[in-house]
Each structure stands twice: as structure tokens, then as C-alpha cells.
Amino acid sequence: MDLGDVLDDLEDGVVTYEEDTHVLDIRRDEEIPSRHVEHRDTAWRLIEALVKDEPAVYEKAKRCARLTEIVQNNDIAWNAATRYLQRYWRRGMTKNALLPRFNACGAPGRQRADTTVRRGRPRRIGFPLGANITEEHKRCFSLAIRHHYAKNRKLTLVDAYKTCLRLFFSDMIVEENGRIRHVEKPEFVDIGFPTYGQFKYWVKAERFSHDVLRQRETSRIYEMKRRGLPGSTTREAWGPGLRYQIDATVVDLYLVSSRDPKLVIGRPIIYVVIDAFSRLITGLYVGLEGPSYVAAMMALANAAAPKKAFCAQFGIDIEEEDWPVHHLPSILLADRGELAGTGIENALETFGVLIENAPPYRGDWKGLVESQFRTIHSGFKAYTPGYVEPDFQRRGAHDYRTDAVLDLEAFTKIIIDMVLVYNRFHVLKDYERHTGLTEDGVLSIPLELWRWGIANISGPPKARPPEQVRFALMRTEQVSVRRHGIRFRKMYYTCDTAISEGWLEKARAKSFKITVSYDDRDASRIYVHTPKVGLGFDIARLAPKSIQYDTLSGWDVAALKLKDDRLHAHHEQAEQLEDAARISRMEQIVEDAKERLRQAGPAGPAAKRVRDIRPNRAREKAERRVSEAMAFRPDADQPKPELGVVVPFSPPVSRSVSQSIRPRAALLKSRLKKTSEKDDE
């Protein structure tokens, strides 16, 4: 066909253009399976000379003659030769056009039609024949997966297959003796049950895996370990100081006491504050306070404080530019357990810091700081005695606690040194770099990224006086002022402001409320909010009424008071019972007195009873004086008798003494008798 005829046919619409949907295969030989390469090279050797003989290859007579020679010389079929040539032309006229398309064989992913002929390879044994999987079978598979495998985490896929056979492919029979057995259903006697391989294949083919996995895992585990990770922490923070992450870990290392190295004190806690943009560690706490608000407060206070003075406390000499971070972030991501519900949100709002709390048990939300803990552990575990290996709880394993030699100060030095090396020299291999970093030749080192980000993106983060930050991070509480002082947790405090403004005197008339901040580690002082003072607070110390708690922490005081309350609670019931007995005895005494009055006869007119109260009182008082007088026995001053001397129980009274006492007593009795007779008249 001439070119002119083709052009005419295009104009007349007899011939139309069609877009070539074939994509050229540009893979290198090392990327192609060797079997496919062998097929390609064999076909290429057969038609290479033919396709290079242009334009003769496009003339039918010459092309057929050459194809005949190829068929005869290589003993291949005519169709095979023409198929190679057509494949070469259709797929781009390149050598790789001859690659076989084994991936298109077998109709992968398409379901086969149900027939009576068994699909798949023949069975090696030959019996049973084997079953083709029908829609009814797949429905049974689905029920076993969704209602048993997905809802029971202890059930394996093999167990789910057995459950499927038991429920849907067999019948249960209860024998006369009560024994239960299963027999196959009639339709499966000859062909047999679906195999476990068929069951597993169709479970995957029906795409149960994703949904079932979500059901078998808890939501927390799935979201943390199974879900995809399309996001980027770096993209969430477009500059230094915008977003910090804070978290804690218990170090797998045992420490000894700084006072006595023979005493093992347990494992320390590390809090790390890290900048999301630069990965720079901005704050640190190493101590014994468990993961709590107190320890988190220390780490945040450290993040806002200059690091030169901090390092100097541990004998490490640095310059400010070695760790130039003393700033607060715009956003702080933390655990709910430490910063939720503590009032820190309101405190940090004054500095423009927004608190974000991660969901419970979702460490993946703080991926940066979580990965940093792995780096810290790997940095010292091979060099520090007392590190806890994974075999710690195995029977016969070494007790690593006995190897402890480091105290808290020495371990803190190690951690600070590791942080300095990490910040200044560690290259972040997987860091998502800004194009400007490459243009400026900046390495992906945390400190370099921090400096570059401040200079080119965000500017310096917000810095606040460390004292104000520490004060804002303390917990606050409304307390009352009373006459004894400022009452906080059943303790009393006083301060200069309270004395100068007469708070205690005012509280005697009516108590009033004030706001204080406190640190649970020191019960000897609280901080009264007084805007009139320079830093916004006045230090209140324990008043004399509560000075006994001066050297204790707030937790110690709370423990003591709880113990006192328990002691009082145990005694309270005994006190109530004894008071009830006292009232009963008192009522009995009153009843006895009433009975005595009744036995004494009529009391006479009421006017007479009240008129003679004074003389009655005089007589009673005279009688009471005799019985209440402090008279000593005559033998009280006599020396003790010697051993062996018989001492009578009632020694004889001296005649002179009895004569001196009796006249006075007789005289008093006669006078009282006369007075009584006059009153009766």
C-alpha cells in the first residue's frame, strides 16, 4: 500500500488513528528475572537479522521468504516466528519487546466459573477427589472468619478452619452413651472437605485480612503498630521552637546511693524535651521522681533555663552557643497522665504555650522523643555496670542490680554528655530536608538545623525569665487565711505581706481566700500570689504552729496526716462507746439520787427548801471539811521495822493522841446537831 493511499483513507475515515497503549519496557537486565531474559534472547537471535533488514522486512514476499528460512534452519513453528515478529512491532520495536508476559497468564485475580470439573492440579494421592470452592463454601468461610476468628484473639487461622469444618461441613451426632462425634455431610463423602490451603486462599482473596486485623487488635495497638504513616512530624513544625514533644522513660540501669555506694536505690527516670523541627534536645531531667507532673515540670523548667549554669552544676564546662536553648515552645505535645487536669494549661497560657495531650497509650504520637530514648539507651548500655539485659527475669540469669556502681550525679553527667554530642554532631539520616539547607550547605545536625531555622524561617523563639517559668509551672490552689496563718493542707504559713497588711487580724473577724503556688517536694514554704511584689509572689514559710513539718516534703506530710487520721479513726469508735457508757452511768446516778430523795419522805414546801439554802450549804461545807482535811496517820513518820519483827495490822493508838482528837470531834458533832434541830423547828 502506498503512503498516498493511506493518507486518502485517513481523510475519508476509512482508516483511523489509535493511541498505542503499550508502555515500553525499559528495565535493565539485572531487574528482569533470568528466565524471562532467556526467552527474550532466544527470540531476538531468531528475528534480529530480519528486523534489521529494512525496508525489505516491510515487503510481504521478502519477509515471508526470510521467515521460511528461519523456520527451517531453527526447527520452530511458523506461528512462533510470526508471533515474535508481531510482538516486536507491537511493543515498540526494542529488544525488551520480546520479553514474555507471564504476569498476564492465568487470569490472576479473576474468579473461575463453577463447573463440575475439578480445578487445580491433580492430587498426588488421588483420594478424596477434592472440592471446587463455590459461593456457598465462601459464605461459610466468611462466617467462620467474622464470627469466630475476628472476635477471639486466641483463635489461630488453623483453629478457624477447624471451626468452619465443624459447624458447616459436618453433622454432630450424640450417641446413646452421651458421646458426641461428627460425621461429614453426604455431599462431602466422595469429594472431601475443602482443604486448609483453599480456606486460606479464599480468606486472602476475599480481602478479610485488613478488616479482621482491625477487629483482632485493640484500637490502640492497631493505630500504634498497624496503621499506615503518611504524615510527617517535620511538616507539623515549620520552624524551631514552634512545637516541642516531652516524654519520660525508666532507664534500664540500677544506681547506688550518693551517700553510701553500697546501697542500691533503683532505676532513674529520664524526661526529654525535643524540638520537632530540628530534633534538638531542648530540656532534660534525670532523677528519681517517677513519670509525673513534678518531673515534667522540672524538664520544662530546664528547657526554659540557660544550659551553661545547668551543666556547671555537674562539672561540665560549655559555652552558651554549645547549647543555646532557653525558650518555651508555641505548642507542647505531652501525655495526658502528666499534664492533663493539673492547671498547667492556664499557667502556660500567659506565655502563649498551647498544650496538646496525646491519647492514652499512644507513644507513636510522640515518635521523635520515643526514638530518642532508644538512642540514649544504646549509647551507654555497653559501658555502664548495672544495665538490665532482657534476660533479667529468666531463671538462673545474672542479677544485674548487684553490678550497680553509678550514683545519680555520675549518671546525669553521662546523659548530659550524650545530649551535647547528639545536639552538636549527630547527623539525622532520614531527616526531611528543606531545599534551603542544601543551597546553604547545612548538614542535618540538630544544632545546625536549629540555627539555620532561626536565621532563615522563624526567628528566635520566645524566651522568659527562668524564675517566672518555674513559678508558672507550679501547681496552684485556693487556700484560706485564718487567725493562725495561711492554712494550706492543715498546715499554717505566714509571710511578710500577711504581716504587713494584717491578714491574720482581719481573719479573726472573717477568713478569706487567696491563691498560692506550691512544690510538693518542699513543705516548708509556699508562694503567695501578690502582684505588688516584683516577681508576682511572696514566699510564705511555716508558722510556729506547724514548724514540726519544716524538713518534710508535701508527700511526707500527707502520709503523716493520713496515718494520724487512721489512728484517730480506729480510736473514734472506742471513744464513742466509752462516752455512751459514761452517759449510762450518769443516768444511773441520777436515778439513784431520785430514789434516795423519795425514800427521805416529803420534801416540804418549795419556798422552805429554797429559803434555807445558805445554812444548808454551811452545814454541808463544815462536814466536807472534816472528810477533806489532809490528816496524816500518826505512824506515817515511824521508821520501817526490822526484818523478822511481827508488825500488827492495826497498831494501838496512843492514849494521849486519842484524847486530843476525840474532844474536838465530839464538840463539832454537838454543834452540828444543835444547828440541825433548830432548822427542823
Image: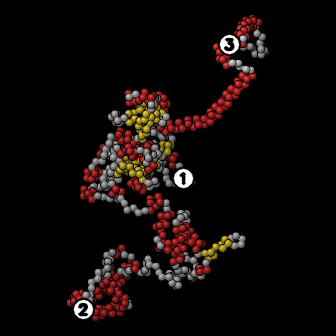
Q: Is residue 299 visible?
A: no
Please say whether residue 434 is visible from this viewpoint.
yes
Which comes before the other along the chain, label 3 or label 1? 1
Residue 399 coordinates in the image, percent (x, y): 53, 49
Q: Of helix, strand and loop, which one carries label 1?
A: loop
Residue 408, given in percent of the width and then of the height, sits at: 44, 42
Q: CA distance from mark 1 to mark 2?
A: 87 Å
Give SS at disc 2.
loop
Q: Which residue is mark 3?
A: 619
- How crowded is the residue under tag 3: few (<14 C-alpha within 10 Å), some, or many (20+)? some
Mark-to-mark CA distance, 2 and 3: 161 Å
Please tell me the numbered disc located at residue 1. 2
x and y percent of residue 507 in the render?
A: 44, 30
The amino acid marked with disc number 2 is Met
283 lies left or right of 257? left
Determine whether, in the image, residue 614 is placed left or right of residue 322.
right
Which mark is in front, 3 or 1? 3
Residue to which mark 1 is pinned:
393
